[in-house]
Image (spheres, rainbow, N blue to C red):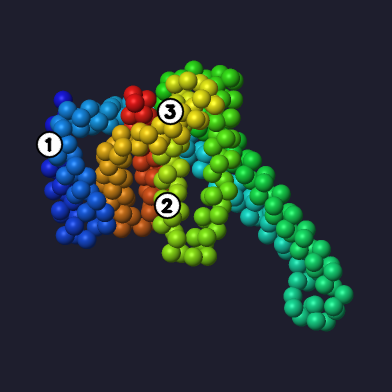
Amino acid sequence: MVNTKIIAISIIAISVAAFFMKIPGSIVLAVIGLVLLILPTKYISELLTKYFEVFKNYKKVATTVAYDALFWTAITGLAYVYKLLFEKKLLAEYVKTGFSKEALIADPAIAATMAQSLRGIVVYTLIGLAVFVLLAYVAYTISRYFIWTELSSQKRAKKTFWSYAKLTGAWWAILILPSAVIIAAATKTPQVAALVLIFFLAAAHFTSFLYTNLTKTGKAGHSFTMGLAMGLSKFHRVLVPYGILFATWWMLSTLASIINYMNAGVASAVTLLFALCILAISRAYLYTIIKSL
């Protein structure tokens, strides 16, 4: 049995040291330590046992890290290609019409040509964006299919893949509009940046319930409704696991900061690797928790 008291006291001790070192998040870490100390030992021991089992299955976690890395590589590549094509289109239209206030004053007749070119750029941008979203959806579906079947040891088959595709499509259909609105608002008003974080944390919360249910039932429609319902009704059941994951995130991010401070040349690589690791650990841990609810 996991000695919960020692772990809780250790977390509190680390948080106190971090507080005096002025490391962000130390107060939240202290609260988590106190919660682990106060709650029934049997309950916390069960949660921590499931948490440490994630590391026993490190090969599965490492495999999901690889799948996630491939997904983000694909997204980065798609974004780069989209940027290049957009810049190429913009340059071509500029060369053709000479977009400028001076050109319009010199020849007012060019206004119609400029307006037509602007419409062309807008249409080109929207079509390009639609293609980008479609390809991102395909990449996300494939990566989630391999990640969640890996975690659950679910048999891979064409029927299973289409269930993932349908569930992902339904979930994206709900998220895409509010995501665009919130991100656009955050770029114009930095004060609402916290809203972006809250939104994506909420989306991640429900995503875990959706895909965990899919690994159990194999039915997209049932998993969708059940996942949303459980995400709301069982929220209190994952609060302590979220606290444990926050402690993990805090320790890994602090370690990454120290490594980056010592060797700035590897900063980006270390940050990316640690981010992928915490995502994989969180996903695997929440899967073990949610599947037993």
| Res. 65 in view | no
Q: Amino acid at mark 3?
A: Thr
Q: On the rendered image, what quadrant is the N terminus found in? A: top left
Displayed quadrant of residue 141: top right
The residues bearing labels 2 and 1 have C-alpha atoms spaced at a distance of 32 Å
Q: Residue at x 12, y 37 (%)?
A: 6
Sequence-wise first label, 3 or 2: 2
Sequence-wise first label, 3 or 1: 1
Q: In the rendered picture of this protein, how many numbered marks are placed on residues?
A: 3
Q: Provide the residue designation for mark 1.
A: 5
Q: Residue furthest right?
A: 109
Mark 3, secondary structure of its residue: helix
| Percent coordinates x, y for residue 217 in the rendering | 47, 20
| Percent coordinates x, y for residue 281 in the rendering | 35, 36
| Percent coordinates x, y for residue 72 in the rendering | 51, 43
Sequence-wise first label, 2 or 1: 1
Q: Provide the residue designation for mark 3.
A: 212
Mark 2, secondary structure of its residue: helix
Q: Amino acid at mark 1?
A: Lys
Displayed quadrant of residue 191: bottom left
Displayed quadrant of residue 93: bottom right
Q: Residues within 10 Å of mark 1 (few under 14, many from 20)?
A: some
> Horizontally, is 256 left or right of 232 in the view?
left
The residues bearing labels 3 and 1 have C-alpha atoms spaced at a distance of 30 Å
| Percent coordinates x, y for residue 52 in the rendering | 26, 30
Q: Provide the residue designation for mark 2.
A: 197
> Horizontally, is 117 left or right of 51 in the view?
right
Q: Look at the picture and state if 135 lies above or below 53.
A: below
Q: Residue at x 51, y 38 (%)?
A: 70
Q: Amino acid at mark 2?
A: Leu
Q: Look at the picture and state if 75 lies above or below 230.
A: below
- Viewer-side residue, 117 vs 243: 243
